[in-house]
Image (cartoon, grey):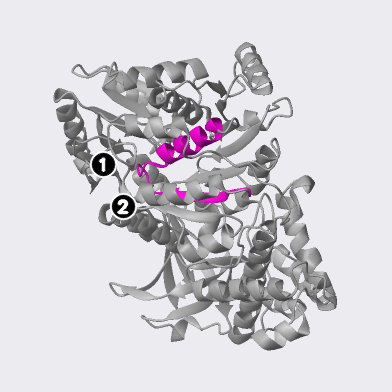
Amino acid sequence: MLLWPRRHEDRTTITPLSEVKSGGDFTVVGCISRADYDPRRQVLRISVTDGLFVIYATFFHARWLTRQLQSGVMVVLSGPVEYWGTRLIMKHPQHEVLSPGEMPQQGLIPIYPLTGELKQRWLQQLMKQVIPILAPQAADPLSQEILNQERLISRGQALLHLHWPPSQEALEAARKRLIFDEFLRVSLAVMRMKQWDPGMPGIRQNPQGVLSQTFLTQLPYALTSGQETAWRSIRQDLAAQRPMLRLLQGDVGSGKTLIAILAILAAVDAGHQAAFMAPTELLAEQQWRVLKDLTASLPISIGLLTGQDPSQSGKVREGIAQGTLEVVVGTQALLSPSVRFHQLGLVVIDEQHRFGVRQRAHLAQKGYFPDLLVMTATPIPRTLALTLYGDLTVSQIEGLPPGRQPITTIHLPYRERRTAYECVRQAVRRGEQAYVVCPLVNENDDQDVVAATVLAEGMQRIPGWRVGLLHGQLPRKDKTQIMEAFRCHDIDVLVATTIIEVGVDVANATVMVIEQADRFGLAQLHQLRGRIGRGAKPATCYLLADPKTEEAQSRMEAMVRWSDGLKLAEQDLKIRGPGEILGLRQHGVSAFELADPIHDASLMEHVRQVAHDILESDPMLDFEGHQTLKRWVDDAVASALPNQMLH
């Protein structure tokens, strides 16, 4: 019942081919009289007839359709019609294959996501049978008072009409109700997570201690105004006798790590341990090196725990348990039951969008309500951040450190690929370094994909530059050695996969070439671009791509137009939707299945206020009319947090 349709096709009217005209959207039925596939261009062209009239359809990247759309097959086609010369043509229309004797469905037809051998018509028929039986049985978490106040239909009716709406108005009413439910459940769940026991003791850190002050005086540069603002808020939290719960947002290269180090030193100054969790081994090692380098003159012990070296990890675990290691940087290995802290006072989690609420709570659980600082370079529009991270206070680092040059981004078609690599060669001649990013490690059946191994081998045969190869399939030791060689400038050009997306910091790298950039999302492209321009020299990022869809072209244009992460995040939401972009499934409560935080932003803000009003009048959701609502929300919270963290 909760398998939502991806969309609805409007087949209210099936138009005879004799009445189809250019410039409108039509649904037609006919028999395929001819099907021609061009394997080089991957284009399928079909002719569809009703015996008297003919319409033509073209499908792009259509090798997978050649088995379905063959001569003699009856089809339903839906989409815009235009003239191509003297012919009426539909470009990549929605389509349905009809079995012999089968009649086309009419009305607003749900189109479901499929997997394996599932057939669309079979699933539609199944849902048409079961939804009218199950939907009326669905418990409604909203009281009649809220339904009346918000002018919402019942949940049962919404479930029924989302699958098989009798009209467009009924579909919109169903969507509004179910989107309201999604926003309300997330808002209440997140707000409930923030309902700490007022008597819960916090851990008071020492942000004015010797280590923090010494570190600041030894820095060769002052904090930016954005860093100062963020540190002021965090400093107040650390000094307070209550647990800090703070999300630190900052664009790529804004200096979040420096703020994290200050927080860590405040914890150590107070006699506590600090844990820094990163999403990958490579990033954990990078951050460990950064912490060690920047605090080299301070009397502080820092360990690394990634779970890859059993002999070394045993010593690190022992140091954590005995308290001789004051700071530990690690991956999810820190969540292991065998990791016991002597006195954990602060948890720092990098790249928050890659971890869920459950994971960060498990780590926090290893101390006695330690302070929590989570960081992300994936910017989130303010309203969405309040809804998703309402259990955290949000700080934003505005701007970049002084001396940073803006990155010039250039989109080149493949016929101009030589231009990008000539720029790489010139950078190497100037003593600078470059990255080349590929979508795959090795070649596969798709001959059009540029593989890192093949490209690196080819470049290594060309004299004049030292080329290295880095990807996730390499042993950990090799990855570390290659990154160290690049950092020490023993490698001029690093050919890599997206393993370098976060955490890699080489100030001398000034050029990046991203092969087949249209295969990457905006957030990923922005993170990759952030690996260059980290010094005082100008930097250039080349996006090599021949986009085949409007969406891919939009991504290239957005990257060239904007360097601001928040602008790109909003554009990414518009293009692809929230689920993948922001890692909402990993957030732990619930991904938005129907809601669009950009399109539905005003409703999201309104529902957040409704959630606030509900909890203000009934903080524990104990009122008689809120019992179903409480179970519904508590299920979401319980799936996100360990039982010990619920208050």
User: Of residues 511 and 79, which is closer to you in this image?
Assistant: 511
Q: In this view, does 407 lie above or below 281?
A: below
Left or right, residue 63 beside residue 89: right
As drawn, 223 above or below 215: below
Q: Which quarter of the image is occupied by the C terminus?
A: bottom right
Of 634 and 21, which appears nearest the observer? Answer: 634
Can you identify the residue that label 2 sits on? 559
Identify the mark at residue 184; answer none if there is no mark. none
Q: Which of marks 1 and 2 is nearer the N terminus?
A: 1
Q: Which SS class for mark 2? A: helix
* Range drawn in magenta: 242-269
In the rendered image, residue 8 lying in the magenta stretch gets the answer no
Instruction: Check disc 1 and report the residue beneath it.
Output: 541
Q: Can residue 259 be seen in this view?
A: yes
What's the residue at 67%, 17% (across, down)? 318
Examine the image and state in which quarter residue 262 appears.
top left
Residue 609 on image: x %, y %: 60, 74
Above/below status of 178 relative to 559: below
Give residue 1's position: percent from left, percent from top. 75, 66
Taking 151 as reference, is 428 left or right? left
Residue 509 position in % (x across, y down): 26, 30
Measure how far apart labels 1 and 2 are at the Cα level. Answer: 10 Å
Up-down: is 373 above or below 66?
above
Specify the amino acid type for callout 1.
Answer: Cys
Q: Which amino acid does label 2 sit on?
A: Met
